[in-house]
Image (cartoon, rainbow, N blue to C red):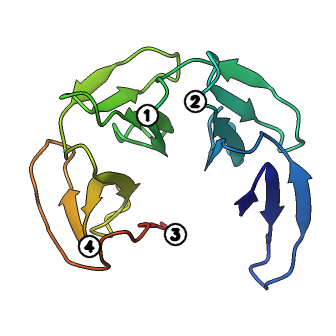
Amino acid sequence: MFRGNEWIIDYHRDGSVDTRDHFGIPGDVPLAGDFNSDGTLDRAVFRASAWDNWIFDDQMDGVVDTRDHFGIPGDVPLVGDFNSDGTPDRAVFRASAWDNWIFDYTMDGSADTRNHYGNAGDVPVVGSFNADAIVDRAVFRNGEWIIDYSMDGSVDSRPGFGMAGDVPMVVTL
């Protein structure tokens, strides 16, 4: 979990803290993924107030390894293999734009693709919603999950679960 700027990790899922350290500052958005494609999990924070707003810790040692820019304040950062090439990508959901999903497939800070899915006020969520191990996208809107399995902008499923004000979470195993 991420509390303030403290990462509290339970590697064994037994309810006990295995490691606790600091990376980031209060207000950062924590992210995890294999950002450098070395086969191990890395962590990052998205800091909306900074120009180099993606801050990476590839060694999980609390030291900044890389900083770069992608997105603007107000964006919601997202991580997943959005183009199904086997490597992690990043995206931002920009509620203020028509093409509100902005993807950076090469992790070089450039927008490779922009498209529309959802509306301002929606909460973007990514995961494998149809259990095919391929990243899908969804927006959570007032207790409804509006899911796009093929990342083509079409609504494939609209299950209800939760209610307005809930914070949606997805865990893909």
Question: How far across and how far down the image is residue 110, in percent?
Answer: 43, 14
* Separation of marks 3 and 1 at Cα, in angstroms: 26 Å
In the image, is residue 18 above or below residue 37?
below
| Residue position marked by numbered label 4 in the rendering | 143
Q: Earlier in the sequence, mark 2 or mark 1?
A: 2
Q: Earlier in the sequence, mark 4 or mark 2?
A: 2
Location of the N terminus by quadrant is: bottom right
Q: Amino acid at mark 3?
A: Leu
| Residue where numbered disc 2 is placed | 48
Q: Position of residue 65 (x, y in %)?
A: 80, 26
Q: Residue at x 27, y 56 (%)?
A: 138
- Which one is in front, 51 or 111? 51
Q: In the rendering, at what x and y percent does residue 54 appear?
A: 62, 28
* Figure check: 144 above or below 45: below
- Crowding around mark 4 (Cα neighbors within 10 Å: few <14, some 14 to 19, many 20+) is some
Q: Looking at the image, which is closer to me, 57 or 118? A: 118
Residue at mark 3 to residue at mark 2: CA–CA distance: 29 Å
Q: Which residue is mark 3?
A: 173
Identify the residue at image location x=76%, y=53%: 4
Q: Amino acid at mark 1?
A: Asp
Which is more N-terminal, label 4 or label 1? 1
Q: Position of residue 81 (x, y in %)?
A: 43, 43
Dot 4: element = loop
Mark 3 / mark 2, whichever is N-terminal: 2
How far apart are the alpha carbons under marks 4 and 2? 27 Å
Callouts 1 and 4 close, C-beta under 8 Å: no
Residue 159 appears in which quarter of the rendering? bottom left
Residue at the image position 51 percent from the left and 39 percent from the top: 88
In screen coordinates, is 78 left or right of 103? right
Q: Which residue is mark 1?
A: 75
